[in-house]
Image (cartoon, rainbow, N blue to C red):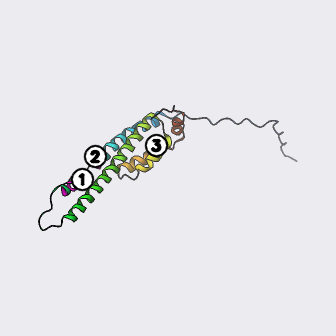
Amino acid sequence: MDHAPIPPAPSEPPALSAPATVAPSGQDLAHLDTIGILYYVLAGITAVFALFPVIHLIVGIGMLALPAQPGQPGQEAVLVGWLFIGVAVSLIAFGMTLAVLFAMVARRLRQRRGYMFCVVASAVSCLSMPFGTVLGVFALIVLTKAPIKALFESAPSRAA
């Protein structure tokens, strides 16, 4: 028979080496910094657009402040005034909350901390079309790279 001999079994199993962590490239770090800056820009744009309902707020306050005109029912004007104020305050609060969220993401991306916060906030920013969607997708692509995740995990945690 022309078979090769069976090699002997090793006496001890090979040592399992710890997975080597690859350091993030300079390009990955530059992407992280750029995305952080763009989140600051998105926070500013969101804050500006969140102030548009101030017009409705002023109209609502005006409806409450002005006396009812003769021949017009005053009760409906008061109700509509409160409706304008309620909707305006809600929209302003929601927009400013998003702006603060985007600013927090920008800061944490630049500091390389809060990995899960950055991932979740990047997913939330995808709902802010069109700029937030593009930025959120790019942020998620960069954040899901293994070296970037390791970079966030190795960063010293600081109190925010």
Q: Does the magenta stretch mainly form a helix, a strand or a loop?
A: helix
Tell me residue 110's x, y (percent): 42, 35
Q: Verify whether residue 56 appears in magenta.
A: yes
- Please tell me the numbered disc located at residue 118: 3
Earlier-in-chain disc, 1 versus 2 = 2
- Circle 1 is placed at which residue position? 57
In the figure, is residue 66 to the left or right of 30? Answer: left
Of circles 1 and 3, the one toward us is 1
Quarter assignment of residue 18: top right
Of circles 1 and 2, the one toward us is 1
Between the residue at mark 1 and the residue at mark 3, the CA separation in whole angstroms equals 33 Å
How many numbered marks appear?
A: 3
Residue at horizontal 21 percent and vertical 54 percent from the top: 61
Tell me residue 153's x, y (percent): 54, 36
Magenta residue span: 49-63
Q: Secondary structure at mark 1?
A: helix
Q: Is residue 71 above or below residue 100?
A: below
- Position of the C terminus, as image quadrant, is top left
Q: Verify whether residue 43 appears in magenta.
A: no
Earlier-in-chain disc, 2 versus 3 = 2
